[in-house]
Image (spheres, grey):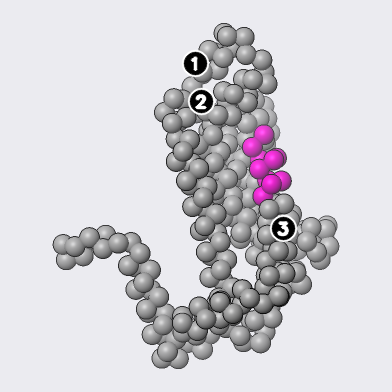
Amino acid sequence: MTLFGYRVPMMASLLVWCLIWEIIGRAHLVFLLPPLSEVLAAAVHLVQTASWQNATITTLRAFVMGMALSILFGVPLGILMGRVKIADDLLGMWVNIFSSAPLSALVPVLMILFGFGERTIVAAVFLFAIWIIVLDTRAGVRHISPSLVEMARSYGASRRALYTKVILLAALPEILAGIRLGLIRGVKGVVIGQLLVAIVGYGALFETFSRNFRMAEFWALTIILFAFALLVAQLIEQAEAKVEYYAGAR
């Protein structure tokens, strides 16, 4: 970004919004928006409490389990749809429907199926994350050059070697992109699931803070969640950058 002929770092825009937040909070223009300095102080205090630490363990456990299941099922399903036309015809419509549907409306159904507990949160993360992983994996497989597959077959590659050493690696950039987007959607899933269940993890904390108008802690917890989502996405993005040469070879 350039301002008056000078190059301004992108981080400057974040600092401007932080300053605006602080000014609005100090002016008491919005009751539900305390000053940013108080929110940051509340965040420092919050991470030292046993309730936050227990909620974080519960939330991370559900998030990791849900994401592991979505990757475990999403990547093979995407490869299947990319390689087998009949599977793509049968499943493509449903994958596109679920990827664009308001999945928050299905969380109460998960509560009926799995009860008011951690299994519902895991199912919510899985439901939010898997579809984008399937679609990106499918796109990566369908963009593989047929010459790579023919070359592998001409050298006598087995079906297992063809999928693990050629197709999977050639589609790896898109697979990682799908996982990165799936991680972000998974964070949404774990938060929405816990908010609706409201008795486990961060959902219980959000419910407590909002019900007692402890807005500094409420926004502190929100910022922590945003920071976690950005950190995870950045780590996956760095992994994407390291495998970009596969796309060139493809």
Magenta portion: prevailing SS class: helix
Indicate whether 106 appears above or below 51.
above
Crowd band around label 3 with a 10 angstrom C-alpha radius: few (<14), some (14–19), many (20+): some
Q: In the structure shown, which secondary structural element does the residue marked by tag 1 occupy?
A: helix
Front-most of residues 228 and 31: 228
Q: Which of the 4 quarters of the picture holds residue 168?
A: top right
Q: Which of the 4 quarters of the picture holds residue 142?
A: top right
Res 224 visible = yes
Indicate whether 134 appears above or below 191.
above
Three-letter code, disc 1: Ser
Three-letter code, disc 2: Ile
Mark 1 lies on residue: 147
Mark 3 lies on residue: 61
Quarter of the image where the N terminus is located: bottom left
Which residues are the magenta region?
67-76
In front of the other: label 3 or label 2?
3
Question: How many numbered marks, from 0 up?
Answer: 3
